Image (cartoon, rainbow, N blue to C red):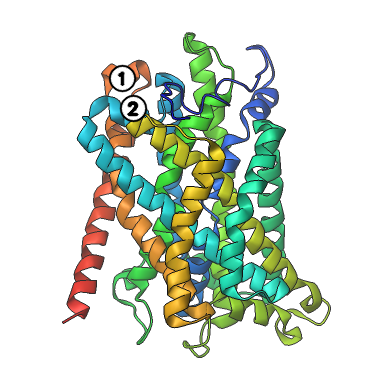
Amino acid sequence: MLKISTVSLEEINNTVYIPDPNASFLRKLWAFSGPGALVAVGYMDPGNWITSIQGGALYSYLLLSVILISSLIAMLLQAMCVKIGVVTGMDLAQATKSMVGKKISFCLWISTELAIIATEIAEVIGSAVALNLLFDIPLLIGVLLTVFDVVILLILMKFGFRKIEAIVFCLIATIFIIFAYEVLRASPELSDIINGFIPRTDIFTASIKGHDSALVIALGIVGATVMPHNLYLHSSIVQTRKYDRQNRTSLKDAIKYATIDSNIQLSFSFIINCLLLILGAALFYGNDPDNLGRFTQLYDALKDPHMVGPVASSIMATLFAVALLASGQNATITGTLTGQIVMEGFIHLSIPLWARRIISRGLAVTPVILCIYIWGDKENIVENLLIYTQVFLSIALPISMIPLILVTSNKKIMKEFVNCKLTIILGWIATISLIILNLQLIYEVISSLY
């Protein structure tokens, strides 16, 4: 039944106990650890995988600087999300709704839902490709099977939110270990990696005929790294902790430990995305650009004993496919929760989680099925679609960033917790820079049509 909800995700809001104020630093940090892991999942979903692998395969370590800058921006924005949730008791959607009218709220809801669908498409494609690699299931059937992951979500929700956080963190750690080992086996050049973190103007000009330019891949990395839906998600799930909503010291502690949790988890996602790009560069850069940098090619390369050694080749490829499947399923949880948050926050509409899951996944699989129907059951076709969804996320990102900065910079709303001048300046620099780059990308796309 449809209903009105005034508390963000009220079924889990204010449900996780925290220690008393005199507890040790580590006990407090442990109590607030968890939401950061769910947020970090969005920074290492299949969309991140393909853009990072493609970036390394086509342009070597050039785009490592983009991952670094994107991750720093993500930490800044997620810290703002923590403050909104803790200080106002609202998520970003609710806070934005309180500042604008119904018509603007509805438009923002539509744009955010499209961003969630773009994220879901990445999860669908990643999971379908993983099933194809592991069990030789045709892509179309794999896409259809992803519809049934609603069962996984409903089972996990019965465990309680704290256990979900633990499961997600274990999966993140597993992915990290797998790719750290695979990169070590690939033996990349350390000096080239270090130079890759230095921003260069080549990002704006580099291109390979017949392939996406470095700018397109760079914006895909930004869209895959700083994901719009995570801004809404974090501002809500940070409120799951039972801190004293009326006590100044309690609010400061909540902001402090939730921000530390966020930064630790985002550091993990930063390292994983760097490992993916490094792996793509080490295995594929300099080879035939028409046959590199995709999930299938990376899977085949990891099966090659000449690439990773005779012993490692027997398990490396399988581990890669398992990690890809886990990544897609991981992001399923956060995508569904975010959909509920923005629907309740922007238009005050709530539906059961299972219904929300079926609707969002149904909207996501449709374009993938059409893509396969029109162009065939080919990995390169659906993976191209995946890259363009990440570029769309980059274009949609400022729509969420602007209200986030406005709310957290408003002293009437945030009181003593308002953004400092440096944070405001950095936030606007990031937003304006992203808008300019998106406009340049749109201009390039339109120019290429004539």
Query: Can the viewer see residue 408?
Result: no
The crowding category of the residue bearing disc 2, from other C-alpha atoms within 10 Å (few below 14, some 14 to 19, many at least 20), is many
Question: Quick check: 396 above or below 252?
Answer: below
- Tell me the mark number nearer the camera, choosing from 1 and 2: 2
Q: Earlier in the sequence, mark 1 or mark 2?
A: 2
Question: Quick check: 87 above or below 285?
Answer: above
Amino acid type shown at disc 1 = Ile
Report how many numbered discs are placed on residues in the image: 2
Residue at mark 1 to residue at mark 2: CA–CA distance: 9 Å
Which quadrant does the C terminus fall into? bottom left
Between 383 and 289, the one nearer to me in the picture? 383
Q: Quadrant of residue 59?
A: bottom left
The crowding category of the residue bearing disc 1, from other C-alpha atoms within 10 Å (few below 14, some 14 to 19, many at least 20), is some
Which residue position holds label 2? 95
In the image, which disc is placed on residue 25? none
Q: Residue at x 29, y 48 (%)?
A: 398
Which residue position holds label 1? 413
Between 331 and 27, the one nearer to me in the picture? 331
Q: Are marks 1 and 2 in contact (CB under 8 Å)?
A: yes
Helix, strand or loop status at disc 2 = helix
Task: Check the image and name the residue furthest to the front.
Answer: 1
Percent of width and height locating residue 98? 28, 25
Helix, strand or loop status at disc 1 = helix
Q: Quadrant of residue 143?
A: bottom right
Q: Residue at x 33, y 69 (%)?
A: 215
Q: Residue at x 54, y 38 (%)?
A: 353
Query: Can the viewer see residue 6?
Result: yes
Q: Residue at x 72, y 73 (%)?
A: 135
Percent of width and height locating residue 108? 29, 41
Percent of width and height locating residue 332? 57, 50
Percent of width and height locating residue 68? 46, 56
